[in-house]
Amino acid sequence: MTATLVAICAFGFFASVVDAVAGGGGLISIPALFIFLPGASPALIFGTNKFASSCGSGAAVARYAASKKIVWNVAIPAGILAFGFAILGAHTVSLLDKNLIRPLILVLLIVVAVYTLFNKDIGKIHAPKLERKQELWISIAMGAVLGFYEGFFGPGAGSFLVFALVGLFGYDYLSASATGRFINFTATFAALLYFIFAKTVLYNIAIPMAVANVAGGMVGSRLAIKHGGSFIRALFLIVLIAVLAKLTWDTFRS
């Protein structure tokens, strides 16, 4: 079990580094947990991952906050709505078939990837283009929609957040990544509370994995702050392609 735990923590660390920069860390950590814990149920896998990823996200948020890269007037209202709607999304999972929305998400992600790829100047300069009142109402709507999506489905939520903050708000990639990490953290934490209440967390795995995720979150946010927008944009595109590949596989397999 020791070797298995070390491997899980290693994957958790790497997933948290990626997640802190561009989102999408779950694409690394969740498959790893399924591989190394073959006897665990999906509910235990997701609950354990949420526990660890919440800690990693929290560490990244703390780092971004210290560097003053989070736009709080957007992050706080969006985060509050994301928290509430993530719980609503988690409840809705049992009522709706997630396979029905997978093709729609696939198309949206393709649009995001193509737009980002062919607009090389987007996100280079931090030039907010909305008035304060517009930012408030759009951030509320964004938090509600993406919070619900995070609780209901999940893949690509962090990527959509970064894209929305760059494309709609006019933020540079670093500010978008920092602000999006806070919003995503609130939604992830809400989902974690749901899993804790349902008693679907393997704490003997989740706690050491959380320590690795905290280290990864600190490293990832530090890399993002140090290397800036070009680095984040490149990793953002890589994560988008990975999410697209995963969703395409799941769509055709089902």
Image: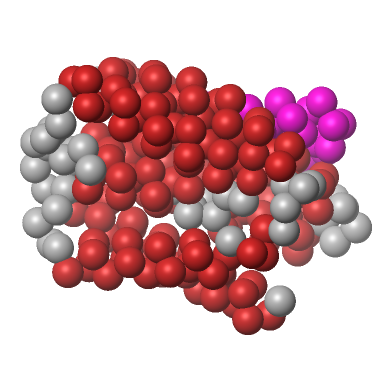
Q: How is the image coloured?
A: secondary structure
Please identify the dominant SS of the magenta region. Answer: helix
Quadrant including the C terminus: bottom right
Return the residue nearer the eye: 151 or 53.
151
Identified at 9% across, 42% down, the residue is: 125
The answer to whether any part of residue 103 appears in the image is yes
With 76 as the anchor, is 38 left or right in this view?
right
Identified at 27% across, 70% down, the residue is: 114
Q: Which residues are magenta?
A: 186-207
Q: In which image quadrant can residue 60 be found?
A: top left
Return the residue nearer the eye: 131 or 35.
131
Q: Is 109 situated above or below 189? A: below
Q: In which image quadrant can residue 238 be found?
A: bottom left
Return the residue nearer the eye: 103 or 13.
103
Give the x, y percent position of residue 50.
Answer: 66, 38
Q: Is 75 situated above or below 160? A: above
